[in-house]
């Protein structure tokens, strides 16, 4: 059994940050669960374009307000507490935080914790990240 405390992890190397977001990596590939689990916070007023070509991601909004746009279709959806979205087609998307967004995120395959977004908004394939 794994038990982890967000309040402890947020002050360790399990917290990673990039352009106006932070992510506390609570489960990673080395934990052997087959997915990784993160609590990610996006700053109010920020906009992020991602394209996880090698990963699937599901995201649940804990708090805040924003929107997500599918860049292939132009369709935009409201993000608010209780809303979940899943990038089941490696969807190229833009996420906007109108207010600070706190999101619970799962990645498959799991991330290792050392990934950085590449120029195209993706993470490297899992075999290249190891």
Image (tube, rainbow, N blue to C red):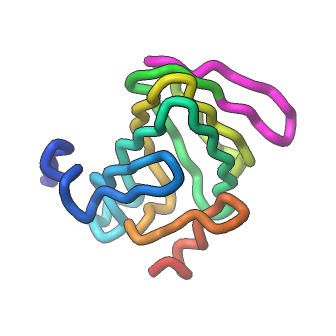
**Rendered position, 124 above or below 66:** below
Q: Is residue 55 left or right of residue 17?
A: right
Q: Where is residue 97 in the image (x, y as percent from the top left)?
A: 56, 30
The residue shown at (44%, 64%) is 111
Q: In this view, does 92 lie to the left or right of 29?
A: right
| Quarter of the image where the C terminus is located | bottom left
The residue shown at (68%, 22%) is 77
Tell me the quarter of the picture where residue 61 sits. top left
Q: Is residue 118 left or right of residue 40?
A: right
Q: Where is residue 17 in the image (x, y as percent from the top left)?
A: 41, 56
Foreground pick, 29 / 39: 39
Foreground pick, 52 / 99: 99
Q: Where is residue 121 in the image (x, y as percent from the top left)?
A: 66, 58
Total marks in image: 0
Tell me the quarter of the picture where residue 85 sits. top right
| Residue 15 forms part of the magenta stretch | no
The magenta segment is: 68-81
Q: Position of residue 110 (x, y in %)?
A: 44, 61
| Residue 69 forms part of the magenta stretch | yes
Tell me the quarter of the picture where residue 31 sits. bottom left
């Amino acid at each position: 059994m794994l038990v982890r405390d967000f309040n402890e992890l947020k002050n360790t190397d399990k917290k990673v940050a990039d352009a106006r977001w932070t992510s506390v990596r609570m489960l990673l590939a080395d934990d052997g669960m087959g997915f990784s689990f993160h609590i990610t916070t996006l700053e109010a007023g920020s906009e992020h374009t991602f394209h996880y070509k090698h990963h699937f991601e599901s995201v649940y909004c804990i708090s805040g307000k924003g929107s997500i746009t599918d860049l292939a279709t132009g369709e935009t959806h409201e993000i608010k507490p209780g809303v979940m979205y899943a990038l089941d087609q490696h969807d190229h998307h833009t996420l906007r935080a109108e207010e600070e967004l706190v999101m619970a995120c799962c990645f498959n395959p799991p991330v290792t914790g050392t990934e950085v977004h590449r120029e195209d908004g993706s993470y490297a394939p899992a075999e290249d990240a190891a």
